[in-house]
Image (cartoon, rainbow, N blue to C red):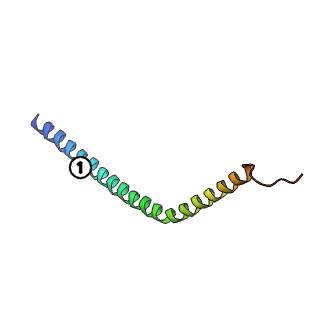
Amino acid sequence: MPAVSLVTIGLSVAGLVVVAFCAFKVYLGVRRFGRELDRARARLEPKHAVLRDELRDLQEARAARDSGDGVRSS
């Protein structure tokens, strides 16, 4: 009976080692993914700001055109 207990404990420890290894690999992957996201965000931020400015200019132009403050010819 003690041999069965030792085998069971040994297999359990081996299983935990495999799970710990997989968890560590996932941790490394998530950390690398986070760095990639930060890098992509840093690269896209200037372009996002330019697009935001263009959108604001277009909205201001549309508001000026639709406000009715312009001169109408009869």
The three-letter code of the residue at mark 1 reads Val
Q: Helix, strand or loop at disc 1?
A: helix
Query: Dot 1, how many residues are within 10 Å of its Cα: few (below 14), some (14-19), or many (20+)?
Result: few
Looking at the rendering, which quadrant does residue 58 occupy? bottom right
Where residue 45 sits: x, y (%)? 50, 62
Quarter of the rendering containing residue 7: top left
The reply, left or right, for residue 1 in relation to residue 24 is left
Where is residue 15 shown, x and y percent of the image? Answer: 25, 45
Residue at 70%, 54% (x, y): give it: 64
Q: Nearer the viewer, residue 49 or 11?
A: 49
Q: Which residue is mark 1?
A: 17
Relative to the observer, which residue lies in front, 59 or 6? 59
Question: Left of 61 or right of it: where is 6?
Answer: left
Residue occupying image coordinates x 21% and y 43%: 11
Picture coordinates of residue 25, whole percent (x, y): 32, 55
Q: Is residue 5 above or below residue 25?
A: above
- For image coordinates 47% across by 62% down, the residue present is 40
How many marks do you count on the picture? 1
Please tell me which residue lies in front, 50 or 4.
50
Residue 40 or 6: which is nearer the viewer?
A: 40
Q: Quadrant of the N terminus?
A: top left
